[in-house]
């Protein structure tokens, strides 16, 4: 979506939220500002009288069901209860529920609210990025330790991120073969790479020691730094996948950068300061970095209306083919 259509879409969501925000205790004249349009649409709602602000997330129709959204919030509540990670509190509505509904832009959309968390996204090229990834490794280890012992509610339901749901027969983010600008030669390379990934992941396995509930989107855009605190936001993609996939997601959209190797070392160091991480899992991390890049190529194609996808376009797909060549040259030796 672009130009006038994008403006109209966002305005329809904003108008819907103007009335829905009252359910979270905000007056109808609250200022509602757009923060991000990606998988979902995120807004900041501010009470003009008190200055109180909350974050409102409008879910994309047809992705998460209501019980899946509630399950995400259940995990966040328990993480906060045990001080596992700094993350914003989900906010209940006046009736005690956590999920509101509104009709906007032609669909009924689920909406949830969170406390506003201060901070800014870490800069990719900042001096402190390596130290930040060391801390992120420790945070990831604490998250993984928590899920290994957490007794999930009987109603808990989240998606599974494995080969079949990423690149296989039931892709959650669309068919990678629809990649923007993908030609026949590039498709042939990616077909080989997909087969190699399937073989590797089958051998690597999904045992409980390396596969469980993960955040699945710990990229820089979902981290907030403020006075030494590293906050984690947006558990919307959380689901069942490989634990080391959390590192792969953290380097989303700059997988090709030479600094990734240094960031991996820092992340592993931070992780091992909290919990064991076997050498075999560390050795597998670059494979998951490529898997994530492959998956994002499908996401860009299936979310072509979003500003992120529009900015990346065909060059992102071509870059994936280049990385696939490099991946195959290593794995097929």
Image (cartoon, helix red, strand yellow):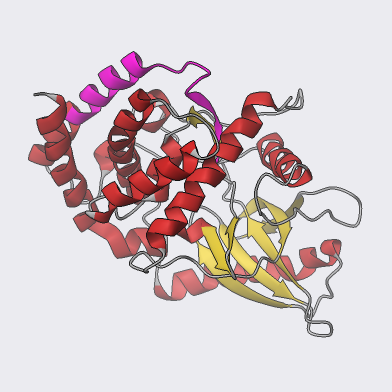
Judge from the rendering whether residue 167 lies leftward or rightward of residue 34; answer left or right. Answer: left
Residue 108: x and y, percent? 67, 51
Residue 110: x and y, percent? 68, 50
Q: Is residue 28 above or below residue 201?
A: below
Q: Which residues are magenta?
A: 193-215
Image point (37%, 69%), residue name: 126
In the rendered image, residue 202 lying in the magenta stretch gets the answer: yes
Residue 69 appears in the rendering: yes
Q: Nearer the viewer, residue 215 or 294?
A: 215
Picture quadrant where residue 213 is located = top right
In the rendered image, residue 55 lying in the magenta stretch gets the answer: no
Residue 219 appears in the rendering: no
Image point (25%, 37%), residue name: 177
Q: Nearer the viewer, residue 248 or 94?
A: 248
Judge from the rendering whether residue 236 lies leftward or rightward of residue 19; answer left or right. Answer: left
Residue 290: x and y, percent? 28, 39
Judge from the rendering whether residue 16 lies leftward or rightward of residue 178; answer left or right. Answer: right
- Quadrant location of the N terminus? bottom left
Picture quadrant where residue 65 is located = top right
Image point (50%, 63%), residue name: 37
Image point (79%, 56%), residue name: 91
Judge from the rendering whether residue 18 lies leftward or rightward of residue 329; answer left or right. Answer: right
């Amino acid at each position: 979506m672009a130009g006038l259509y994008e403006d109209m879409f966002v305005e329809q969501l904003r108008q819907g939220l103007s009335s829905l925000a009252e359910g979270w205790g905000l007056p109808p004249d609250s200022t509602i500002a757009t923060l991000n349009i990606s998988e979902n649409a995120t807004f900041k709602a501010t009470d003009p009288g008190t200055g109180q602000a909350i974050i409102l997330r409008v879910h994309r129709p047809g992705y998460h069901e209501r019980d899946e959204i509630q399950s995400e919030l259940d995990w966040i509540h328990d993480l906060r209860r045990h001080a596992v990670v700094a993350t914003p509190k989900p906010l209940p509505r006046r009736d005690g529920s956590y999920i509101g509904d509104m009709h906007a832009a032609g669909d009924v959309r689920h909406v949830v609210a969170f406390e506003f968390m201060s901070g800014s996204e870490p800069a990719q090229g900042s001096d402190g990025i390596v130290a930040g990834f060391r801390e992120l490794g420790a945070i990831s280890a604490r998250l993984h330790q928590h899920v290994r012992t957490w007794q999930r509610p009987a109603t808990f339901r989240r998606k599974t991120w494995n080969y079949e749901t990423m690149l296989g027969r039931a892709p959650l983010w669309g068919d990678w073969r629809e990649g923007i600008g993908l030609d026949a030669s590039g498709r042939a390379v990616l077909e080989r790479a997909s087969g190699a990934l399937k073989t590797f992941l089958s051998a690597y396995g999904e045992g409980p020691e390396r596969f469980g509930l993960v955040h699945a989107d710990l990229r820089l855009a979902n981290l907030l730094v403020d006075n030494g605190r590293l906050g984690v936001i947006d558990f919307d993609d959380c689901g069942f996948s490989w634990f080391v996939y959390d590192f792969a997601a953290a380097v989303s959209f700059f997988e090709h950068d030479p600094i990734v190797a240094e960031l991996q070392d820092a992340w592993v160091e931070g992780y091992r300061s909290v919990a064991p991480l076997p050498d075999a899992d560390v050795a597998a991390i670059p494979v998951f970095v490529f898997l994530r890049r492959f998956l994002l190529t499908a996401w860009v194609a299936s979310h072509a209306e979003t500003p992120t996808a529009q900015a990346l376009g065909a060059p992102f797909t071509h870059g994936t083919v280049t990385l696939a060549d490099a991946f195959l040259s290593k794995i097929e030796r």
